[in-house]
Amino acid sequence: MKPVKVGLLGLGTVGTGVVRIVEGNQEDLSSQVGSPILIERIAVKNTEKPREIEVDPSKITDDPWEVIRDPEIDVIVEVMGGIAGTKEYILEALERGKHIVTANKDLMALHGSEILAKAQEKQCDVFYEASVAGGIPIIRTLIEGFSSDKIMKIMGIVNGTTNYILSKMSQEGASYLDVLKEAQELGYAESDPTSDVEGLDAARKMAILGTLGFRTNVELSDVSVSGISGVSKEDIAFAKRLGYEMKLLGIAERQDEEFSISVQPTMIRASHPIASVNGVYNAVYVYGQAVGETMFYGAGAGAMPTATSIVADLVAVIKNLKLGVNGLKQIVPYKQKKLKSDEDIFYKNFLLLHVDDKAGVLAKITQVFAEYDVSLDSVVQQANTNNPDAEIIIVTHNASKASMNKVMRHLEQLNVIHRIKSHYRVEG
Protein backbone atom coordinates (compact mmCIF):
# COMPACT_ATOMS: atom_id res chain seq x y z
CA MET A 1 0.00 0.00 0.00
CA LYS A 2 1.44 3.34 -1.02
CA PRO A 3 1.66 5.64 2.03
CA VAL A 4 0.00 9.04 2.15
CA LYS A 5 2.68 11.62 2.86
CA VAL A 6 2.00 14.61 5.08
CA GLY A 7 3.86 17.90 5.46
CA LEU A 8 3.60 19.53 8.89
CA LEU A 9 4.00 23.28 9.32
CA GLY A 10 4.81 23.82 13.00
CA LEU A 11 6.01 21.53 15.79
CA GLY A 12 4.83 23.32 18.91
CA THR A 13 2.51 21.76 21.46
CA VAL A 14 -0.26 21.01 18.96
CA GLY A 15 2.11 19.88 16.21
CA THR A 16 3.80 17.56 18.70
CA GLY A 17 0.37 16.16 19.58
CA VAL A 18 -0.34 15.49 15.90
CA VAL A 19 2.93 13.56 15.51
CA ARG A 20 2.20 11.54 18.66
CA ILE A 21 -1.28 10.56 17.49
CA VAL A 22 -0.25 9.72 13.92
CA GLU A 23 2.74 7.64 15.01
CA GLY A 24 1.13 6.13 18.10
CA ASN A 25 -2.15 5.16 16.40
CA GLN A 26 -0.68 4.13 13.05
CA GLU A 27 -2.35 0.70 13.00
CA ASP A 28 -5.84 2.08 13.68
CA LEU A 29 -5.41 5.00 11.28
CA SER A 30 -4.07 2.80 8.50
CA SER A 31 -7.01 0.42 8.87
CA GLN A 32 -9.41 3.36 8.44
CA VAL A 33 -7.80 4.87 5.35
CA GLY A 34 -6.31 1.79 3.73
CA SER A 35 -2.67 2.89 3.75
CA PRO A 36 0.05 4.12 6.10
CA ILE A 37 0.19 7.83 6.97
CA LEU A 38 3.71 9.25 7.02
CA ILE A 39 4.72 12.67 8.31
CA GLU A 40 7.35 13.26 5.64
CA ARG A 41 8.54 16.84 6.24
CA ILE A 42 8.23 19.25 9.17
CA ALA A 43 8.85 23.00 9.07
CA VAL A 44 9.98 24.65 12.32
CA LYS A 45 11.35 28.07 13.27
CA ASN A 46 14.47 26.69 14.93
CA THR A 47 15.90 23.37 13.83
CA GLU A 48 18.25 23.24 16.85
CA LYS A 49 15.54 23.57 19.49
CA PRO A 50 15.13 20.54 21.81
CA ARG A 51 11.90 18.61 21.08
CA GLU A 52 9.49 16.75 23.36
CA ILE A 53 9.44 13.91 20.84
CA GLU A 54 12.12 12.24 18.80
CA VAL A 55 11.95 13.21 15.12
CA ASP A 56 14.27 12.19 12.27
CA PRO A 57 16.46 15.30 11.77
CA SER A 58 16.43 14.77 8.00
CA LYS A 59 12.68 15.52 7.99
CA ILE A 60 13.04 18.90 9.71
CA THR A 61 13.58 22.22 7.89
CA ASP A 62 13.32 25.88 8.82
CA ASP A 63 11.98 26.73 5.34
CA PRO A 64 8.20 26.13 4.97
CA TRP A 65 8.54 26.46 1.18
CA GLU A 66 10.54 23.22 1.14
CA VAL A 67 7.51 21.46 2.58
CA ILE A 68 4.99 23.24 0.33
CA ARG A 69 6.97 22.52 -2.85
CA ASP A 70 7.85 18.89 -2.11
CA PRO A 71 6.08 16.93 -4.90
CA GLU A 72 5.87 13.81 -2.69
CA ILE A 73 3.61 15.46 -0.13
CA ASP A 74 -0.14 14.98 -0.50
CA VAL A 75 -1.50 16.88 2.52
CA ILE A 76 -0.29 19.97 4.41
CA VAL A 77 -1.17 20.20 8.12
CA GLU A 78 -0.75 23.81 9.30
CA VAL A 79 -0.36 24.42 13.04
CA MET A 80 2.15 27.28 12.98
CA GLY A 81 -0.42 30.07 13.36
CA GLY A 82 -0.19 33.61 12.06
CA ILE A 83 -1.92 35.13 9.07
CA ALA A 84 0.17 36.92 6.42
CA GLY A 85 2.86 34.35 5.61
CA THR A 86 0.64 31.40 6.47
CA LYS A 87 -2.02 32.51 3.98
CA GLU A 88 0.58 32.53 1.20
CA TYR A 89 1.79 29.04 2.14
CA ILE A 90 -1.74 27.63 2.07
CA LEU A 91 -2.72 29.30 -1.21
CA GLU A 92 0.48 28.06 -2.84
CA ALA A 93 -0.09 24.55 -1.52
CA LEU A 94 -3.62 24.57 -2.96
CA GLU A 95 -2.26 25.86 -6.27
CA ARG A 96 -0.02 22.78 -6.30
CA GLY A 97 -2.99 20.47 -5.62
CA LYS A 98 -2.21 19.71 -1.98
CA HIS A 99 -4.99 19.32 0.55
CA ILE A 100 -5.04 21.42 3.73
CA VAL A 101 -5.80 20.72 7.38
CA THR A 102 -5.45 23.76 9.64
CA ALA A 103 -6.20 24.85 13.19
CA ASN A 104 -5.83 28.53 12.29
CA LYS A 105 -8.98 30.35 13.40
CA ASP A 106 -7.55 33.81 12.69
CA LEU A 107 -6.72 32.89 9.11
CA MET A 108 -10.07 31.19 8.42
CA ALA A 109 -12.07 34.01 10.03
CA LEU A 110 -10.32 36.68 7.95
CA HIS A 111 -9.51 34.87 4.69
CA GLY A 112 -11.60 31.69 4.77
CA SER A 113 -13.73 32.62 1.77
CA GLU A 114 -10.70 33.21 -0.45
CA ILE A 115 -9.02 29.99 0.68
CA LEU A 116 -12.17 27.89 0.19
CA ALA A 117 -12.74 29.40 -3.25
CA LYS A 118 -9.19 28.45 -4.28
CA ALA A 119 -9.73 24.95 -2.86
CA GLN A 120 -12.91 24.56 -4.90
CA GLU A 121 -11.12 25.77 -8.03
CA LYS A 122 -8.30 23.22 -7.54
CA GLN A 123 -10.64 20.45 -6.27
CA CYS A 124 -8.78 20.27 -2.96
CA ASP A 125 -9.99 19.76 0.59
CA VAL A 126 -9.56 22.43 3.26
CA PHE A 127 -10.64 21.16 6.68
CA TYR A 128 -10.40 23.28 9.83
CA GLU A 129 -12.30 21.52 12.62
CA ALA A 130 -9.64 22.40 15.21
CA SER A 131 -10.00 26.14 14.59
CA VAL A 132 -13.13 26.30 16.78
CA ALA A 133 -13.71 24.67 20.18
CA GLY A 134 -10.68 22.36 20.18
CA GLY A 135 -11.80 18.76 20.54
CA ILE A 136 -15.52 19.40 19.95
CA PRO A 137 -16.46 18.33 16.39
CA ILE A 138 -18.76 21.32 15.90
CA ILE A 139 -17.69 22.29 12.36
CA ARG A 140 -18.26 18.79 10.98
CA THR A 141 -21.59 18.74 12.80
CA LEU A 142 -22.73 22.02 11.24
CA ILE A 143 -21.67 20.88 7.75
CA GLU A 144 -22.89 17.29 7.87
CA GLY A 145 -25.15 16.76 10.88
CA PHE A 146 -27.31 19.79 10.10
CA SER A 147 -27.16 19.47 6.31
CA SER A 148 -30.90 18.74 6.14
CA ASP A 149 -31.95 21.35 8.69
CA LYS A 150 -32.07 25.14 8.86
CA ILE A 151 -30.01 26.53 11.74
CA MET A 152 -31.76 29.40 13.49
CA LYS A 153 -29.43 30.05 16.43
CA ILE A 154 -25.88 29.23 17.52
CA MET A 155 -24.91 30.20 21.07
CA GLY A 156 -21.56 29.24 22.47
CA ILE A 157 -18.87 29.45 25.10
CA VAL A 158 -15.97 29.30 22.63
CA ASN A 159 -13.13 30.76 24.70
CA GLY A 160 -11.81 28.71 27.61
CA THR A 161 -9.79 31.52 29.20
CA THR A 162 -12.76 33.80 29.76
CA ASN A 163 -14.93 30.91 30.90
CA TYR A 164 -12.30 29.95 33.48
CA ILE A 165 -12.15 33.53 34.76
CA LEU A 166 -15.93 33.98 35.01
CA SER A 167 -16.37 30.53 36.57
CA LYS A 168 -13.82 31.27 39.29
CA MET A 169 -15.36 34.69 39.95
CA SER A 170 -18.77 33.04 40.32
CA GLN A 171 -17.64 30.12 42.47
CA GLU A 172 -15.23 31.98 44.75
CA GLY A 173 -16.47 35.58 44.70
CA ALA A 174 -13.03 36.67 43.51
CA SER A 175 -12.25 39.81 41.53
CA TYR A 176 -11.55 39.85 37.80
CA LEU A 177 -7.93 40.99 38.18
CA ASP A 178 -7.11 38.36 40.83
CA VAL A 179 -8.50 35.51 38.71
CA LEU A 180 -6.84 36.84 35.54
CA LYS A 181 -3.47 36.78 37.33
CA GLU A 182 -4.11 33.21 38.47
CA ALA A 183 -5.11 32.18 34.92
CA GLN A 184 -1.85 33.62 33.59
CA GLU A 185 0.19 31.76 36.20
CA LEU A 186 -1.55 28.49 35.25
CA GLY A 187 -0.98 29.09 31.54
CA TYR A 188 -4.68 29.47 30.70
CA ALA A 189 -4.20 33.13 29.79
CA GLU A 190 -1.42 34.77 27.77
CA SER A 191 0.82 37.45 29.26
CA ASP A 192 -1.12 39.81 26.98
CA PRO A 193 -4.67 38.48 27.40
CA THR A 194 -6.36 41.12 25.23
CA SER A 195 -7.50 38.79 22.45
CA ASP A 196 -9.23 36.50 24.94
CA VAL A 197 -10.68 38.88 27.54
CA GLU A 198 -11.87 41.51 25.06
CA GLY A 199 -13.77 38.90 23.05
CA LEU A 200 -11.67 39.00 19.86
CA ASP A 201 -10.77 35.30 19.91
CA ALA A 202 -14.42 34.34 20.42
CA ALA A 203 -15.50 36.75 17.67
CA ARG A 204 -13.22 35.05 15.13
CA LYS A 205 -14.69 31.67 16.04
CA MET A 206 -18.26 32.97 15.82
CA ALA A 207 -17.53 34.40 12.37
CA ILE A 208 -16.53 30.89 11.28
CA LEU A 209 -19.57 29.25 12.89
CA GLY A 210 -21.91 31.88 11.46
CA THR A 211 -20.52 31.39 7.97
CA LEU A 212 -21.08 27.64 8.18
CA GLY A 213 -24.42 27.79 9.97
CA PHE A 214 -26.01 30.46 7.79
CA ARG A 215 -24.18 29.64 4.53
CA THR A 216 -23.20 33.26 4.03
CA ASN A 217 -19.90 35.12 4.22
CA VAL A 218 -19.72 36.39 7.81
CA GLU A 219 -16.76 38.72 8.26
CA LEU A 220 -15.13 39.62 11.55
CA SER A 221 -16.42 43.19 11.19
CA ASP A 222 -20.00 41.80 11.18
CA VAL A 223 -19.58 40.59 14.78
CA SER A 224 -20.51 43.03 17.56
CA VAL A 225 -17.91 42.48 20.30
CA SER A 226 -17.46 43.37 23.96
CA GLY A 227 -15.27 41.59 26.50
CA ILE A 228 -15.26 40.70 30.19
CA SER A 229 -12.72 43.18 31.57
CA GLY A 230 -15.55 45.36 32.91
CA VAL A 231 -17.35 42.50 34.69
CA SER A 232 -17.15 42.88 38.47
CA LYS A 233 -17.72 40.36 41.21
CA GLU A 234 -20.71 42.50 42.25
CA ASP A 235 -22.24 42.01 38.79
CA ILE A 236 -21.87 38.26 39.12
CA ALA A 237 -23.34 38.31 42.63
CA PHE A 238 -26.39 40.22 41.37
CA ALA A 239 -26.75 37.74 38.50
CA LYS A 240 -26.70 34.78 40.89
CA ARG A 241 -29.31 36.42 43.14
CA LEU A 242 -31.61 36.75 40.13
CA GLY A 243 -31.04 33.15 39.05
CA TYR A 244 -28.44 33.72 36.32
CA GLU A 245 -24.81 32.88 35.61
CA MET A 246 -22.46 35.24 33.76
CA LYS A 247 -20.82 33.85 30.61
CA LEU A 248 -19.03 35.34 27.63
CA LEU A 249 -21.35 34.10 24.91
CA GLY A 250 -21.11 34.21 21.17
CA ILE A 251 -24.65 34.47 19.82
CA ALA A 252 -25.60 34.09 16.15
CA GLU A 253 -29.31 34.36 15.39
CA ARG A 254 -31.27 34.18 12.15
CA GLN A 255 -34.81 35.22 11.37
CA ASP A 256 -35.98 34.62 7.81
CA GLU A 257 -32.76 35.36 5.90
CA GLU A 258 -31.44 38.15 8.14
CA PHE A 259 -28.98 37.46 10.94
CA SER A 260 -27.01 39.08 13.74
CA ILE A 261 -23.83 37.91 15.50
CA SER A 262 -22.40 39.19 18.77
CA VAL A 263 -19.91 38.29 21.49
CA GLN A 264 -20.66 39.80 24.90
CA PRO A 265 -20.86 39.06 28.62
CA THR A 266 -24.34 37.63 29.06
CA MET A 267 -26.50 36.67 32.01
CA ILE A 268 -27.90 33.24 31.20
CA ARG A 269 -30.59 31.51 33.24
CA ALA A 270 -28.94 29.07 35.67
CA SER A 271 -31.27 26.28 34.50
CA HIS A 272 -29.96 26.49 30.92
CA PRO A 273 -27.44 23.67 30.26
CA ILE A 274 -24.80 26.08 28.98
CA ALA A 275 -24.82 27.90 32.35
CA SER A 276 -23.28 24.85 34.06
CA VAL A 277 -20.26 24.73 31.73
CA ASN A 278 -17.33 25.84 33.90
CA GLY A 279 -13.55 26.10 33.83
CA VAL A 280 -11.73 25.99 30.52
CA TYR A 281 -14.42 23.89 28.87
CA ASN A 282 -16.34 25.03 25.79
CA ALA A 283 -19.93 24.38 24.76
CA VAL A 284 -21.91 25.21 21.64
CA TYR A 285 -25.71 25.25 21.65
CA VAL A 286 -27.36 24.93 18.23
CA TYR A 287 -31.05 25.37 17.53
CA GLY A 288 -32.26 23.82 14.27
CA GLN A 289 -35.68 24.54 12.80
CA ALA A 290 -36.43 20.82 12.56
CA VAL A 291 -34.28 19.15 15.23
CA GLY A 292 -34.80 21.78 17.94
CA GLU A 293 -32.21 22.20 20.71
CA THR A 294 -28.82 20.46 20.71
CA MET A 295 -25.63 21.14 22.68
CA PHE A 296 -22.01 20.07 22.19
CA TYR A 297 -19.57 20.12 25.10
CA GLY A 298 -15.92 19.34 25.62
CA ALA A 299 -12.33 20.54 25.88
CA GLY A 300 -11.98 23.74 23.91
CA ALA A 301 -8.20 23.85 23.80
CA GLY A 302 -5.10 21.91 24.73
CA ALA A 303 -2.54 20.00 22.71
CA MET A 304 -4.20 16.60 22.54
CA PRO A 305 -7.88 17.60 22.10
CA THR A 306 -6.87 20.00 19.33
CA ALA A 307 -4.53 17.44 17.75
CA THR A 308 -7.34 14.87 17.85
CA SER A 309 -9.54 17.17 15.72
CA ILE A 310 -6.64 17.78 13.31
CA VAL A 311 -5.95 14.08 12.81
CA ALA A 312 -9.69 13.40 12.35
CA ASP A 313 -9.64 15.98 9.55
CA LEU A 314 -6.52 14.34 8.12
CA VAL A 315 -8.32 10.98 8.04
CA ALA A 316 -11.29 12.61 6.27
CA VAL A 317 -8.98 14.12 3.63
CA ILE A 318 -7.30 10.77 2.96
CA LYS A 319 -10.64 8.94 2.71
CA ASN A 320 -11.76 11.50 0.13
CA LEU A 321 -8.44 11.05 -1.66
CA LYS A 322 -8.99 7.30 -1.93
CA LEU A 323 -12.54 7.85 -3.21
CA GLY A 324 -11.51 10.61 -5.62
CA VAL A 325 -13.97 13.11 -4.15
CA ASN A 326 -11.65 15.79 -2.75
CA GLY A 327 -13.00 19.32 -3.00
CA LEU A 328 -16.63 18.25 -3.25
CA LYS A 329 -17.57 18.82 0.42
CA GLN A 330 -16.46 22.42 0.78
CA ILE A 331 -19.09 24.81 2.13
CA VAL A 332 -18.46 27.92 0.07
CA PRO A 333 -20.89 30.66 1.18
CA TYR A 334 -23.61 31.07 -1.42
CA LYS A 335 -26.30 33.15 0.26
CA GLN A 336 -26.43 36.94 0.10
CA LYS A 337 -25.42 38.53 3.39
CA LYS A 338 -28.30 40.30 5.12
CA LEU A 339 -27.46 41.72 8.53
CA LYS A 340 -30.23 42.64 10.93
CA SER A 341 -30.62 46.30 11.78
CA ASP A 342 -30.67 47.37 15.44
CA GLU A 343 -34.46 47.69 15.13
CA ASP A 344 -34.70 43.94 14.44
CA ILE A 345 -32.33 42.63 17.15
CA PHE A 346 -34.30 41.78 20.31
CA TYR A 347 -33.21 40.53 23.74
CA LYS A 348 -33.76 41.05 27.46
CA ASN A 349 -31.49 43.48 29.34
CA PHE A 350 -30.10 43.76 32.87
CA LEU A 351 -29.20 47.21 34.23
CA LEU A 352 -27.69 48.25 37.56
CA LEU A 353 -28.07 51.96 38.29
CA HIS A 354 -26.63 54.07 41.12
CA VAL A 355 -29.18 56.82 41.82
CA ASP A 356 -30.27 59.51 44.25
CA ASP A 357 -31.79 57.93 47.33
CA LYS A 358 -35.01 59.94 47.38
CA ALA A 359 -38.67 59.74 46.46
CA GLY A 360 -39.70 59.98 42.81
CA VAL A 361 -36.45 58.69 41.29
CA LEU A 362 -37.87 55.31 40.31
CA ALA A 363 -40.86 56.93 38.61
CA LYS A 364 -38.57 59.14 36.50
CA ILE A 365 -36.50 56.16 35.42
CA THR A 366 -39.41 53.89 34.53
CA GLN A 367 -40.92 56.74 32.51
CA VAL A 368 -37.84 56.71 30.27
CA PHE A 369 -38.37 53.04 29.44
CA ALA A 370 -42.05 53.67 28.74
CA GLU A 371 -41.17 56.55 26.40
CA TYR A 372 -39.27 54.13 24.12
CA ASP A 373 -41.77 51.25 24.44
CA VAL A 374 -39.46 49.05 26.51
CA SER A 375 -41.48 46.99 29.01
CA LEU A 376 -39.99 45.91 32.32
CA ASP A 377 -39.87 42.38 33.68
CA SER A 378 -38.66 43.32 37.17
CA VAL A 379 -37.47 46.37 39.10
CA VAL A 380 -35.73 46.20 42.48
CA GLN A 381 -34.59 49.21 44.50
CA GLN A 382 -32.33 48.66 47.49
CA ALA A 383 -29.92 50.42 49.79
CA ASN A 384 -26.27 49.36 49.94
CA THR A 385 -24.24 49.98 53.08
CA ASN A 386 -21.10 50.25 50.92
CA ASN A 387 -22.69 52.78 48.60
CA PRO A 388 -24.25 56.13 49.63
CA ASP A 389 -26.44 55.96 46.50
CA ALA A 390 -29.49 53.77 46.13
CA GLU A 391 -29.15 50.87 43.70
CA ILE A 392 -31.84 50.04 41.18
CA ILE A 393 -31.79 46.71 39.36
CA ILE A 394 -33.89 46.49 36.20
CA VAL A 395 -34.55 43.52 33.94
CA THR A 396 -36.47 44.29 30.77
CA HIS A 397 -38.63 42.10 28.58
CA ASN A 398 -37.38 41.58 25.03
CA ALA A 399 -36.53 44.98 23.59
CA SER A 400 -34.94 46.06 20.36
CA LYS A 401 -31.29 47.06 20.45
CA ALA A 402 -32.27 50.38 18.84
CA SER A 403 -34.81 51.16 21.59
CA MET A 404 -32.33 50.21 24.31
CA ASN A 405 -29.69 52.48 22.77
CA LYS A 406 -32.18 55.35 23.05
CA VAL A 407 -33.01 54.39 26.63
CA MET A 408 -29.33 54.32 27.58
CA ARG A 409 -28.63 57.73 26.05
CA HIS A 410 -31.62 59.22 27.89
CA LEU A 411 -30.66 57.62 31.21
CA GLU A 412 -27.16 59.07 30.93
CA GLN A 413 -28.72 62.55 30.83
CA LEU A 414 -30.92 62.12 33.93
CA ASN A 415 -29.45 64.08 36.84
CA VAL A 416 -30.95 61.63 39.37
CA ILE A 417 -28.72 58.86 37.97
CA HIS A 418 -25.15 59.07 39.21
CA ARG A 419 -23.87 56.07 37.29
CA ILE A 420 -25.01 53.30 34.98
CA LYS A 421 -22.93 50.65 36.72
CA SER A 422 -23.75 47.68 34.49
CA HIS A 423 -25.68 46.73 31.36
CA TYR A 424 -25.79 43.13 30.11
CA ARG A 425 -27.78 40.97 27.74
CA VAL A 426 -30.00 38.35 29.38
CA GLU A 427 -30.63 34.90 27.84
CA GLY A 428 -32.58 31.78 28.70
Image (cartoon, rainbow, N blue to C red):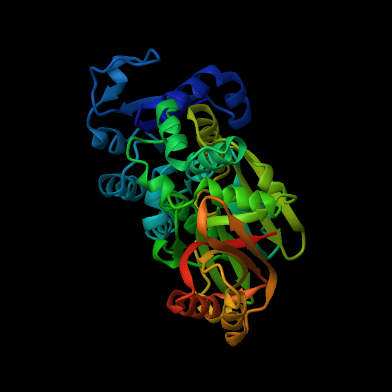
Above or below, comparing residue 423 to residue 344 in the picture = above
Q: Position of residue 134 (x, y in %)?
A: 53, 38
- Which image quarter: residue 213? bottom right
Q: Nearer the viewer, residue 100 or 356?
A: 356
Residue 42 sits in quarter: top left
Q: Position of residue 109 (x, y in %)?
A: 42, 55
Q: Position of residue 154 (x, y in %)?
A: 62, 58
Quadrant in which the C terminus is drawn: bottom right
Which one is in front, 302 or 333?
Answer: 302
Q: Is residue 345 above or below residue 427?
A: below
Q: Is residue 130 above or below residue 155?
A: above
Whether residue 218 is visible, yes or no, is no
Q: Nearer the viewer, residue 174 or 180?
A: 174
Residue beneath the point at 39% across and 65% down: 221
Residue nearest the observer in this picture, 22 or 342? 342
Give the residue displayed 51% in from the left and 34% down from the top.
Answer: 306
* Residue 105 image position (x, y, % from top left): 43, 47
